[in-house]
Amino acid sequence: MGMSMRRVVVTGVGAVSPCGADVATTWRNVSEGRSGIARTDAFDPTGFASQIAGECSDFDPLDYMQKHRLRETARFSQLAIAASAQAIKSACFEATDEEKERVGTFIGVGLYGLEAFEDAWKKLRHGGPRRVSPYLIPTGVANFASAQVTLEWGFKGPSYTHSAACASGAYAIGNAFRSIQHGYIDAAVAGGAEAAITPLGVAGYVSTGAVSRRNDEPELASRPFDADRDGFVLAEGAGVLVLEERAAAIARGAQVLVEIVGYGATSEASHVVEAGPTAEGAQRAMKIAMADAQLNPEDLDYVNAHGTSTPMGDRSELEALRRVFGAHATEGLAVSSTKSMTGHLVGASGGLEAVLCTLAIRDAIAPPTINLHHPDPAGAGMNLVPHEAQDRAIRALMSNSFGLGGTNCALVMQAP
């Protein structure tokens, strides 16, 4: 990379997750190894093969918006607004009208407002086309997470939605990073939001065969890297960062939490759902991100794995980590999956995990992989941070996000 590249820092974080309706609560529960998974409450899951989910049960959208706006926003947008509000407040980020023209909004979303479409479909079937709400399209379409955030704060830079399945949030952050680095904008609100815990969303994911059916023990169902795992647990939420050009952030007296230094994105181009056994595309994404950051494998102290808790996915990620990190994979690197506690937030997972990684660096803690009672032999010799968080100074880390359709993303962050 040329020396003229601008540096990009994180100055604020926001989150709504199954582990808490704000950053502090979420981080406390994640770092203390507490699961946010429970029996599905959003609808009656009787008759569904999977009846458990990671729901944001403590979230109240009225904490962030007036009542009349509820019908203008689907749940995923409400989550995005809430996480963005937290991030902007924690960054003490204020922009003049002129500066707002150089603030971008990048919110990754895997699906869209499923509940709005389900409701509209019922009305169409039973009452005809005139019963379909004029709010359906401007609430339910995927880019309205970004759009609603720009409306709320008046940001006038680029606003768009990265939709790359489970890698959506990470792609959004990566592209916000690039846009600031190259000077197209000076700051961004970036992350992911998702709310797919509806009858259709759950039925669709269950039918892929990738979702856990451990209905009698919800807290134990998400068990990345454990030999007894039987699939991921669908979750909802949002995770958002405020990114700023470093010199400007320091000039305004902002607290610099971490610096984003590397971004790698690739396609597997092999199979619509499964990566190969060595996850070649994921390996390339990790290598590209490290080269971008000008770091060697041994410079990284922690990896927040994609680690969804699917039999195939976890095994191929462990193999990919071995190939990318070499001896360091078993000699000093800590690897954990926070999805063991939060479940899988699909398009929001990369956003939430970037928030958790920011706090891991700030507090010098590697969060745990809970429920790891019988580690998969594929992880032999690796420090998968079982059960309890580990105190460790983290100079640099990587966050992995891999999505259906063979889309891979790796982000590298380092201590300020």
Image: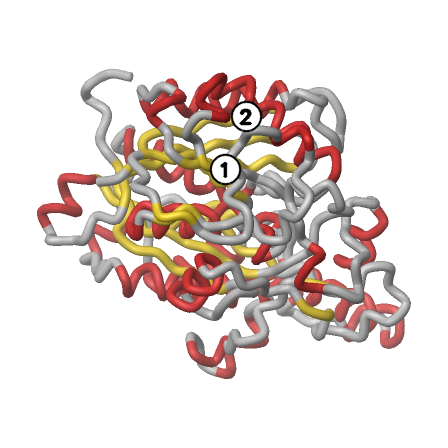
Q: Position of residue 188 (x, y in %)?
A: 33, 47
Foreground residue among 242 and 211: 211
Look at the numbered discs 1 and 2 and tell me whether their residues touch, using CB distance below 8 Å: yes
Q: Position of residue 358 (x, y in %)?
A: 35, 48
Q: Position of residue 168 (x, y in %)?
A: 55, 42
Q: Which residue is painted at 62% across and 55% down in the image?
A: 343
Residue on which disc 2 sits:
321
Can residue 30 be seen in this snapshot? yes
411 is higher (above) or lower (below) than 361 = above
Decide: few, some or many residues near mark 2? Use Cα within 10 Å; few <14, some 14-19, many ≥20: many
Q: Position of residue 364 (x, y in %)?
A: 31, 47
Residue on which disc 1 sits:
335
Q: Amino acid at mark 2?
A: Leu
Q: Quadrant of residue 377?
A: top right
Q: Which residue is painted at 57% across and 39% down in the image?
A: 306
Instruction: Report helix, strand or loop for mark 1.
Output: strand
Horizontal side of residue 268 vs 152, given as left or right:
right
Instruction: Report helix, strand or loop for mark 2.
Output: helix
Q: Which label's residue is closer to the chain start, 1 or 2?
A: 2
Q: Which residue is painted at 51% across and 78% down in the image?
A: 60
Q: Amino acid at mark 1?
A: Val
